[in-house]
Image (cartoon, helix red, strand yellow):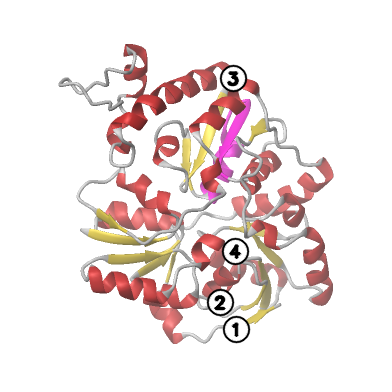
Amino acid sequence: MEVDMAADGTFPALTPQVEAATAAIWPKVREHVTPLEWAAKAPLIAEIQALKQARNAVILAHNYMTPDIFHGVGDYVGDSLGLAREAQRSDAAVIVQAGVHFMAETSKILSPDKTVLLPDLRAGCSLASSITGADVRLIKQRYPGVPVVTYVNTTADVKAETDICCTSANAVQVVEWAAREWGTDSVILIPDQYLARNVAAQTDVRIIAWAGSCEVHERFTAQDIADMREAWPEAEVLAHPECPEDVLNAADFAGSTAAMTDYVMKKRPRQVVMITECSMASNIAGEVEGVQFIGPCNLCPHMKRITLENIRDCLRDMRHEIIVPEDMAARARLAVQRMIDLPPPSKPARYDLVRARGHTPAIELI
């Protein structure tokens, strides 16, 4: 059955209560959600909003969530660093992590007295699964005295073996801080090899890297960008630093998800290509006008396990609670807190592509 908006802009399939609760959301998602889908999604959004109030809960929605989740039910939205901070600041008793497993673990590490729920326990991460705490212990034996910087896209087990965490937004800052604090010219940066290579191109610190990768960003190629430039010569290309080096070298701008968002919001390019997860562009599109977002993009199968339905179910039934053993959490908390305590960058982190092209990075892959 086709569902159309009425002349007054309302949806006849929705109750007045649901219509009122979701009216401000529809304009942000209408380019990505059909009226037929909205007739099913809007009641779910209204139900989740009511459950959040009843449970004293907040939803942390990552940039890679679909627009109905990001704009519809997210109380705090953004990149992993921003969400980690909000998890700690929130006064809510319950945190629902609309993201993947390692993010929920990070929220629990920072908020041990809160109940942290993950809507689907299968929402993992190819990068996080590429390394274990046992691997990190072996690396430290091989490189004694060298500080370990660990990307937040890792399990609590791995974070517990590290000195300080980082995100794509502050990786260069954290690496250089660790080198100064430990009085060394080398830093271990794990587990994303492409982030490590791209950080090495921004610093004189020698980087020791692990051969992990994100299955979403690793699939992009420089040829993808060349093809896009041929088809859309005026489009500006933005790439995430988890992509291979040749992809960043072919881009016009490279930076964290926060930096990419900041770039589009402030510069408002007429056409833009975002070399990252698909929902990132969809969510920014809901906040800006006059910007045409052009593919390519790749979907994260793990992020897409999170839906309005299982968010509703986990809040209704208080299921899929994330537990981190306290001894592990205490050690991981030190690494995450060290990152949070660093002064935030004066502006969202970007990668200097000019410096990268003229700099010979010092990097060892193990």
Is 2 placed above or below 144 here? above
Q: Is residue 211 left or right of residue 22?
A: right
> In the drawing, what numbered circle is on residue 200?
2
Residue annotated with mark 3: 55
**Among the two numbered marks 3 and 2 on one chain, the one whose residue lies closer to the N terminus:** 3
Label 2 to label 4: alpha-carbon separation: 12 Å
- Tell me which amino acid carries mark 2: Ala
- Tell me which amino acid carries mark 3: Arg
Task: State the extent of the magenta-drawn residues as a range.
Answer: 80-99
Residue annotated with mark 4: 174
Label 3 to label 4: alpha-carbon separation: 37 Å
Seen at 70% across and 32% down, the residue is 321
**Among the two numbered marks 1 and 4 on one chain, the one whose residue lies closer to the N terminus:** 4
Residue 192, percent from left and from top: 61, 66
> In the drawing, what numbered circle is on residue 362?
1
Quick one: label 2, few (<14), some, or many (20+) residues within 10 Å? many
**Among the two numbered marks 3 and 4 on one chain, the one whose residue lies closer to the N terminus:** 3
Residue 295, percent from left and from top: 33, 60
**Among the two numbered marks 2 and 1 on one chain, the one whose residue lies closer to the N terminus:** 2
